[in-house]
């Protein structure tokens, strides 16, 4: 599912379902080795986190867009501006394609972990090679023209367990990706103008640290149950 991007919305895709099997297929079709797959995270309790295959290199959060979540989004952006945005090494892509946030979360997850993910020749490697030296905005514009990525997204948006909404149906959920890089945990969201640094982390503590970030999102609206977490991990 996806929320509307801010800025120059030019293209609308059918939203990708928050389904680990469908999202894993997207990665494999675009050239991510089959040793990597997405898996559900069923809760934030330590015993539930312990069930997730290790190592986990990215966590994708799907959350409902609401006035409370939009207020929290603005708060995160202001805090990041106040401490100074110094995230130049982190790959960030601005969302200019409506309903593309699931695919953008996957791109963010892969692009920032290329030290561990050895990409095969395919659409993901091609896109990341072409956009590695671009700004966030240039990458967002490049995604509009990236037919290989777009076609794979459209093919897999037809899969999943729920009825596929039309391209112009407004969707009220949004994906963000969490990754660890250079000792910090970053939130990557195409609707935000830059990565959000959520503080210290490490490869060993990443899943627990990412769970705390997700918990902060959930605490903005404790009565809301429409949160989903999916981990990118080594296949069991």
Image (spheres, rainbow, N blue to C red):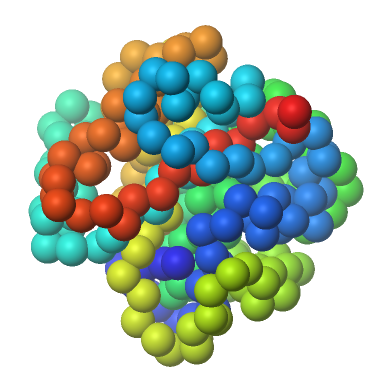
* Residue 19 in picture, x, y percent from top left: 57, 57
Q: Residue at (15%, 35%) from the top-left corner?
A: 79
Left or right of 89 on screen, residue 46:
left
Vertical order, 213 against 103 (above or below): above
Res 61 visible = yes
Vertical order, 157 against 109 (above or below): below
Vertical order, 27 against 144 (above or below): above
Q: Residue at (34%, 51%) from the top-left corner?
A: 227
* Residue 88 in picture, x, y percent from top left: 44, 32
Location of the C terminus by quadrant is top right
Q: Residue at (44%, 20%) from the top-left corner?
A: 47
Q: Nearer the viewer, residue 139 or 198?
A: 198
Q: What is the count of numbered marks?
A: 0
In which quadrant of the rendered view does residue 145 lie? Answer: bottom right
Location of the N terminus by quadrant is bottom left
* Residue 55 in picture, x, y percent from top left: 63, 20
In which quadrant of the rendered view does residue 160 lie? Answer: bottom right
Q: Residue at (48%, 31%) from the top-left corner?
A: 179
Q: Single out the residue that lies furthest toward the right.
A: 121
Res 130 visible = no
Q: Nearer the viewer, residue 140 or 170?
A: 170
* Residue 73 in picture, x, y percent from top left: 20, 50
Left or right of 6 on screen, residue 18:
right
Left or right of 134 on screen, residue 115:
right
């Amino acid at each position: 599912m996806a929320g509307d991007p801010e800025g120059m919305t030019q293209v609308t895709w059918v939203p990708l379902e928050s389904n680990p099997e469908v999202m894993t297929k997207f990665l494999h079709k675009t050239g991510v080795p089959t040793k990597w797959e997405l898996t559900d995270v069923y809760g934030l309790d330590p015993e539930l986190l312990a069930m997730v295959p290790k190592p986990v290199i990215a966590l994708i959060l799907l959350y409902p867009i609401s006035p409370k979540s939009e207020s929290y989004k603005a708060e995160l952006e202001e805090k990041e501006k106040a401490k100074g945005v110094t995230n130049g090494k982190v790959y960030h892509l601005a969302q200019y394609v409506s309903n593309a946030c699931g695919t953008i979360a996957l791109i963010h997850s892969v692009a920032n972990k290329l030290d561990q993910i050895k990409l095969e020749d395919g659409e993901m490697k091609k896109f990341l090679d072409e956009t590695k030296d671009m700004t966030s905005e240039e990458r967002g514009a490049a995604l509009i023209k990236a037919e290989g990525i777009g076609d794979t997204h459209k093919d897999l948006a037809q899969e999943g367990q729920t009825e596929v909404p039309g391209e112009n149906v407004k969707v009220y959920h949004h994906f963000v990706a969490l990754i660890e890089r250079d000792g910090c945990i970053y939130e990557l969201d195409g609707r935000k103008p830059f990565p959000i640094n959520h503080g210290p982390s490490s490869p060993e503590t990443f899943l627990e640290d990412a769970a705390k970030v997700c918990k902060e999102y959930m605490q903005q609206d404790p009565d809301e149950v429409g949160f989903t977490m999916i981990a990118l991990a080594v296949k069991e």
